[in-house]
Amino acid sequence: MGIDHERLLGETMQTDVRAAAASPTTTAGPPAFARRPLLLIAAAFAVVHLGVGAFGGYWIDEVYMLAAGRYHLDWGYVDQPPLAPLLAGAMGWLAPGSMIVLRLPAVLISASGVLLAGLLARELGGDRRSQVLTGLGFATGLWTSLVAHWITPYTLEVPLWMLLCLLLVRWCRQHAAGRADDRLLLALGVVIGGTMQVKVHVAVLCAALLLGLLVFGPRDLLRRPMFWGCVGIALVIAAPTLIWQAVHGWPQLAMSEVVQAETPILSGGRSGAAISMVLYAGILGVPLCAYGVARMFTAAEFRPYRFIAAAAVAQYVFYIATSGRPYYVVGMYGVLLAAGAVAFQRRREARAAAGGRRAAWLVWPAGVLSVLAAGAVVVMSSLLATAFGVPADRALAQEVATAYRQLPAQQREHTAVVGESYILAAMLEAHTDEFGLPPAHSAHRGYGYFGTPDESADAVLFVGEDPEPWRPHFAEVRRIEGGGTPLWSFTGRREPWPQLWEQVRSLK
């Protein structure tokens, strides 16, 4: 019987390709990095967000960061750590009133997520095509498109979570190959500590990762001396905000009740949050993340990283159960996108080896639709400055300044400006110099911890809808006519400010 050498060679090659696709790629070095296309995506991403970010007013959380950083710099705050306010305050000091300068750090940090997404795909064995697909998936995520130019904690934390995952994935890949560099764990401690100074939810991520390690491994990570160095470094860097929270009675924990109460309004309840957590990944991101999670649990290639997928799922369930914000898990999208792109790559390689037809053309319409949807969300974000019934910041400040100047001179010298909410107070303080307003106060959220008005202030110019909580503390409360924003004059303060403040201060 003759041997068909060509047929035998072809079958052998197909078998080798299938085996390579089904076996872990952690023993070999990562593929070449798709630097140029990823840099082009990141540059386009930055240009679009900077261009759109130059228009419109401040986003409500963004103006809060600016006011807190410029006028109330501290080691911590009721509702977030100090790094985002510090950065916003620094930009506001460098170029007062410039939206582009204010938002530049947020845009650049967000754009770095494109490169980090590509690097995650590369670490998982993804070729250039998979790296570009992952980077595009991140850049066109709906949540990313909405917030990437706002200087807020939830904008800054996403690339930091991706960097955290990148260090873990690299350590696990090297560990599977028998040559892990434990110095990566020390770098991991720096990233965790730094992220704790941006948003404390990284503590939940770390708890979920630890649980995943205990269940799925590699448990050897927990036995490494450098792991405990990672823990120590993270605690040292996070110490300022942890100490501030402890001194002030852990108000961040009380904020969880506020978030739960707001979930039905902002997210449509638990079911709405569950859907939003998925849709925020974007048109291209949803199938990549879904397939990535499935393959990380089932494919041998991804076994070293299975605990990361478990941590993502655990957080998804946890935040639905606790009525958390839908964006709390967005930082996990990068590694899930990368896993999905690499898993599709393996299917493509296996199909090509088997002589089957490729379905790669499906990526292009999905990519185009994802870009269009992301572009629409970016444009929409510039129109959200007056969301939730909040007036435009500059118009509000001008209106309040006019009412303040119209007060009798003797009364004006002893009048404090108080906003009903932290948002209104921050919008006023953002334009203090421009309109000659005194420092604004509020008993709401973080502003309630910034201090009371001066004891010489016997009267209040109150900005907001509901003066009722304040009415018992003043002899006279009257509405100031005119303007679109309700303004009230409070006169005849009946008790010292510290005593009054404790009765009106609220996180809700």
Image (cartoon, helix red, strand yellow):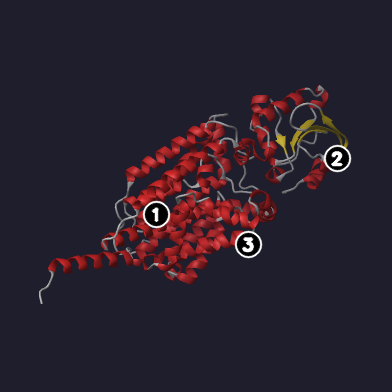
Q: Amino acid at mark 3?
A: Ala
CA–CA distance between discs 3 and 2? 38 Å
Vertically, is 275 above or below 465? below
Give the numbered dot on residue 120.
1
Give the numbered dot on residue 152.
none
- In this rendering, position of residue 364 left or right of residue 267: left
Residue at horizontal 76%, vertical 46%? 505
Residue 473, image quadrant: top right
**For the residues carrying marks 3 and 2, which lies nearer the camera in this image?**
3
Element carrying mark 1: helix
Residue at horizontal 46%, vertical 68%? 222
| Quadrant showing the N terminus | bottom left
- In this rendering, position of residue 390 left or right of residue 479: left
Disc 3 vs disc 2: Cβ atoms closer than 8 Å? no
Element carrying mark 2: helix
Q: Amino acid at mark 2?
A: Arg
Counting from the top left corner in percent of width and height, residue 316 is at 56, 60
Q: Which circle's residue, 3 or 2, is located before the other in the chain?
A: 3
CA–CA distance between discs 1 and 2? 57 Å
Circle count: 3
Q: Amino acid at mark 1?
A: Leu
Q: Which residue is mark 2?
A: 471
Q: Which circle's residue, 1 or 2, is located before the other in the chain?
A: 1
The 10 Å Cα crowd at callout 1, few under 14, some 14 to 19, many 20 or more, is many
Counting from the top left corner in percent of width and height, residue 456 is at 80, 33
Counting from the top left corner in percent of width and height, residue 85 is at 58, 41
Counting from the top left corner in percent of width and height, residue 299 is at 39, 67
**For the residues carrying marks 1 and 2, which lies nearer the camera in this image?**
1
Q: Which residue is mark 3?
A: 321
